[in-house]
Amino acid sequence: DVDVVVGGRYLDKYARRDATWKLVERAIVTDWANVNDPSIVDLSHPITRDTPTGSMDADDPSNGFFSMLRTPPPR
């Protein structure tokens, strides 16, 4: 299996009919596509540099977040 991420645009043409705007034509333009092997994890991109890394166990950052939501507020 692979992951495919595609970026693109719609080029829409609208027409006014009976005081209502309606879509009459749509062209789809593909600007780019990336195909990735999901078995390879690469966290080297600068946007991920200072972020916590997720995991499928108790070390996942969301565990602390969700436990905070379960804690009653102080009175």
Image (cartoon, rainbow, N blue to C red):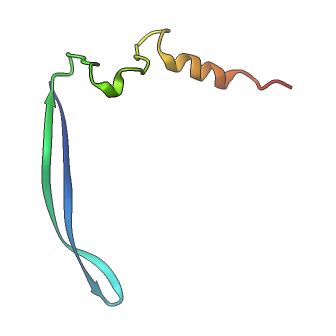
Residue 34 against residue 23 in the figure, above or below: above
Q: Which corner quadrant of the image does residue 4 belong to? A: top left
Compare residues 52 and 24 and report the one nearer the observer: 52
Residue 1: horizontal and vertical position, in percent?
Answer: 15, 24
Residue extending furthest toward the top = 58
Describe residue 65's horizontal placement relative to residue 18 as left or right. right
Look at 54% across and 17% down and name the residue there.
63
Residue 70 against residue 14 in the figure, above or below: above
Residue extending furthest toward the bottom = 18
Describe residue 44's horizontal placement relative to residue 33 as left or right. right
Residue 62 against residue 29 in the figure, above or below: above
Residue extending furthest toward the right = 75
Residue 58: horizontal and vertical position, in percent?
Answer: 50, 9
Describe residue 61's horizontal placement relative to residue 32 as left or right. right
Q: Which corner quadrant of the image does residue 21 belong to? A: bottom left
Look at 14% across and 49% down and name the residue there.
31
Residue 13: horizontal and vertical position, in percent?
Answer: 20, 74
Q: How many marks?
A: 0
- Assign the C terminus to one quadrant of the image: top right
Look at 31% across and 25% down and name the residue there.
46
Look at 20% across and 56% down and name the residue there.
9
